[in-house]
Image (cartoon, grey):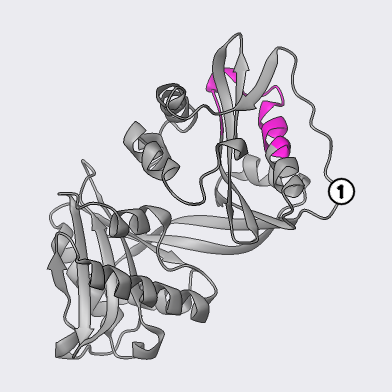
Amino acid sequence: MDDAVAPAQAAPTVHHSLHADMVEAVEHLVGRARRADGVAPLNEHALLHLRGPAVSTDRHLISSAGDELVAYAYLDLSGDAATGAECVVSPASRGQGIGRCLVTALIEASHPRPLTIWAHGDHAAAAAVARRTGLQRVRELRRMRRALDHELPPVQVPDGIDLRTLRPGADDAAWVALNARAFDGHPEQAHVTVEDLRRRQQQPWFDPDGFFVAERGGVMVGFHWTKVEGDLGEVYVMGVSPDAQGGGLGRALTLHGLHHLRDVGLTHVQLYVEADNHAAIAVYERLGFTVAGADAMYATP
């Protein structure tokens, strides 16, 4: 992305859905950007909606120069108060104002509701586009990593807690309810639905043996959902019910998942955490995690 004047042929067009050839072209564009920038330009939610069946509240913005796809943006209009977006510009087509043109189109497409947009990797070029289009920085998500070939502390499960793996289907509704309690007020995670969960259960990376739940008296009170893609593990989502916090369950669940990821042969693990969640960051730092990068969210005033 940049702040030059975009060529007319790259002005984005808005689509409710994309045909298979265009989806493939977008995925190739995403791959090129990831290799160039060292970070994926689109989050999982955007990729799932790119590849999945058409959704009435989805918008896909395409910028082309001749027959070449040079930029793509995903816009989610499902929220009640705001709209969320993700975008990517081809590394070979940067420096031409295409990013600014794309963000301007996103602002127009989301009007009159406010727009939020993630800049993965928190690159200076994205910050420049944000300034030129009147967006303000509102959130920072830190990416933390640690090696798994170093010693891990033992798992100490609190008294009265039983750990087991998720039973897909049978546990779905209970997990969604617990997730909503654990992430009450979170702009994204608090709104995960059973449909969202099942969409992820259908992904190639999903493994119920790496999805751990904690029960107290037969009631689900915590979970640690791990994820493996390639040779990297992830603390995908970890949550504890508000009435079970403060007793060491979060640390036990985190370590239980880390031991699992090491036992399946992984050497590194990452996680994402809000930059202002100082308590969680302190916990992760005590477990050997260090900051490896960040994503920034920008929003219309």
Q: Pointer 1: what residue?
A: 151
Q: Is residue 111 left or right of residue 251?
A: left
Going 31% across and 85% down the picture, which residue do you hit? 3
Q: Position of residue 216 (x, y in %)?
A: 62, 13
Vertical position of residue 262 compared to residue 250: above or below: below
Return the residue nearer the eye: 213 or 37. Answer: 213
Q: How many marks?
A: 1
* Any part of residue 134 in sight: no
Where is residue 283 shown, x and y percent of the image?
A: 70, 41
- Relative height, residue 225 to residue 169 (above, below): below
The residue positioned 24% from the left and 72% from the top of the image is 22
Q: Is residue 257 magenta?
A: no
The image position of residue 185, as x and y in percent, is 40, 34
Q: Residue at x 72, y 26 (%)?
A: 248
Q: In the figure, residue 125 lies in which quadrant?
A: bottom left
The residue type indicated by label 1 comes to Glu
Say if 35 sits above or below 254 in the image: below
Task: Confirm whether the magenta stretch covers residue 251.
Answer: yes
- Residue nearer the viewer, 263 or 301: 263
Count neighbours of disc 1 (C-alpha within 10 A) and say few if under 14, some if 14 to 19, many if 20 or more: few
Q: Quadrant of the C terminus?
A: bottom left
Please provide percent x and percent y for residue 284.
70, 46
x 72%, y 53%: residue: 289
Q: Which residues are magenta?
A: 239-256
Q: Looking at the magenta stretch, what is its main secondary structure? A: helix
Q: Residue furthest top?
A: 217
